Image: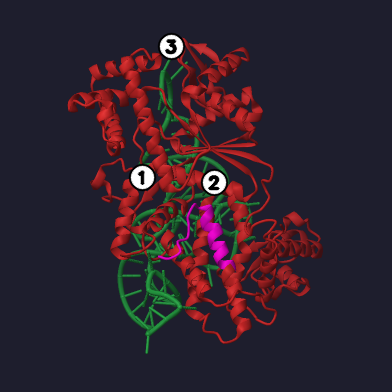
Amino acid sequence: MSYFLDEVKQKLARDVSGLLDVPKDQVVVQVANEKIGSDLAVPCFAFAQKLGKSPQDIAEDLAVKVKLPEASEITAISGFLNIWLEPKALAQGVNKNFSAEKSVKYGNNSDNANQVVVTEYTDPNPFKPLHIGHVYSNTVGESISRLYEASGAEVHRISYHGDVGLHVAMGIWGIIKQLEASDWKMSDVPADYRSEFLGKAYVHGRSAYEGNATAKQEITELNKQIYAKSDKEINGIYEAGHKWSFDAFDDMYKMLGVSFEKSYLESETVDVAKKVVAEGIKKKVFEVSDGATIFKGEEYGLHTRVFINSLGIPTYEAKDLGLAHLKHKDYKYDTSIILTGNEQDQYFEVVLKALSLLHPELAEATIHMSHGMVRFAEGKMSSRSGNAITADVLIENVEEELEKTAPNSPAIKENALAAVKYAFLKQSIGGDIIFDVDQSISLEGNSGPYIQYAAVRVSSILTKAKTKGQASDKYDYEAEKTLLFLLAAYPAIVAEAVNMLAPHTIAGFSFELAKAWNSYYEKVQILSDKDQDTLKARLAVLEQVYAVFEHSLGLLGITIPEKM
RNA sequence: GCACCGGUAGCUCAGCGGAUUAGAGCACUUGUCUUCGGAACAAGGGGUCGUAGGUUCGAAUCCUACCCGGUGUACCA
């Protein structure tokens, strides 16, 4: 679908390009200038030299010559051609796009039509505690997945889990100690205590490994036994712990309202990993050094990393190569997104460099994205549950805060989820997140609940209205101008968010729309208007506003409650 | 040491393919309110955009150096 505002921008660019005799791609059309208040603007500085005229003169000249029927005003101001659009034209344009919804939902596009995209994110490891970072990663990954879907791609959500390795040995070591101390068998651990039990075991094992030489040796030995599956009792503990872990993952996903199509286990990638590395040795991509198979990254300005260790066991590096192949075998992806913490940035550069030398087509299709750590504003929340804050504890905390200020809300859960997801997604991906419960669930301002509230207000009016909305030729839409402009601008914002893989632009837009709507709400009494034509025209706009709230919040994984 | 990421209002952050008077939320000050749901709206104060140079008619945005913080740097993930 071609969107109204895009068409206007194109038309304007074509006009300017023709009038000035400059290439069309050199004409920049900016959208929405807050200072001037114009809807579109063309900076004329770049043309000054070529035309031998001042930017302001060029803009003034254009202001006279440019013909844009959708514009209500065209003025030259300090070197810019500024354009204000006619509210009625905006309403008609937006209506036209909405009525074509059967083919493409308003806001969606077909930029990635026929593309197969595999998104990998969250990646919690069994035997390790779930923490707030997993919630963050999941929220970001889910939003990225939804952005791709909005652009027409076929998206497959997958996750990857380290089911073997030292962290498992540390966890199981801790489990054994805890069982001994409590005189329990695995089956004695109560169902609702399992996650916590595993979490404590891991922390116990890890600190013992780091601080106690005997324990370290025991854990190393245990690791071999787990790998060889040589001890029946240990196997039993492993199987139970593995299941409990995945049950806990499922609980978290369920709470967040997400699901994965497939989970890959690290142990499954070993065979392919070995094969790929063997192939790489032949191609001289890898070499053997000190008994280990390594990739010399220094030749490419990167680090050297080990792919097969000196015991002959593939490392995470090799397994990631194997995983790339497995994913491709399963999905024949055009794009593979891997979302991890940013401490793995340089690691992935090495892995992808190696992959590019072996299978360039896979490397080119792979995008490693990374996010920062979740940290807490000083003194917040940490007292209640220590440093590792699990997903459910986080949500419970937020719910408690919501209870204080909005008791008896029928949508506490939805509000709390929105608060957390929005707090994560309103920031650009990459940097650390300083998470502040008080601020994130603030009832005012740039927050999930604020936007939900605005949307609920819209639906409340739509429900109370005794009639459906209908666009009008007679109505001037002056009061709805800001809302209409935001609606018109929305599809391009989605396209940009997909392009940049930047959910925060969507979050910013939702907030702008909520502010504009709340402001409109104060000024205009909708339902009490006697004029049916006006009433219906306004309701039609509201229906569209609601649809865009639903769409944009949907891209963030946030739902709109019926009431709150 | 080297590499990567970050340093914008008291706090948390947008803006960074240069361009019209540096933005938002929170906090602070002041208004609106017998409301189609005040979890709201209207307005105000507050910034040498880490530092110093450079490129440009024009730099938070590009280049260089430095300072501060985080992370990574061969058999962990």
Mark 3 sits on what residue? A311
Q: Tag 3 or tag 2, which sits nearer the N-term? A: 2
Mark 1 sits on what residue? A391
Left of B69 or right of it: where is A145? right
Local SS, label 2: helix
Q: What residue appears at the point 63 percent right and 69 percent down from the top-left corner?
A: A39
Mark 2 sits on what residue? A144
Q: Quadrant of residue A439?
A: bottom left
Could you tell me how far apart the alpha carbons at marks 1 and 2 are, in whole angstroms? Answer: 20 Å
Provide the letter of the chain coloured red: A
Q: Amino acid at mark 2?
A: Ile
Could you tell me how far apart the alpha carbons at marks 3 and 1 are, in whole angstroms? Answer: 38 Å
Q: Position of residue A9 (x, y in %)?
A: 71, 63
Local SS, label 3: loop
Of residues A166 and A406, the one nearer the viewer is A406
Residue A54 in view: yes
Q: Position of residue A280 (x, y in %)?
A: 59, 17
Provide the letter of the chain coloured green: B
Could you tell me how far apart the alpha carbons at marks 2 and 3 are, in whole angstroms? Answer: 39 Å
Of residues A458 and B1, the one nearer the viewer is A458
The range drawn in magenta is: A544-564
Q: Are marks 3 and 1 on the same chain?
A: yes
* Nearer mark to the viewer, of 2 and 3: 2
Left of A323 or right of it: where is A233? left
Q: Quadrant of residue A389?
A: top left
Quarter of the image containing the C terminus of chain A?
bottom left
Q: What residue appears at the point 57 percent right and 16 percent down from the top-left corner?
A: A275
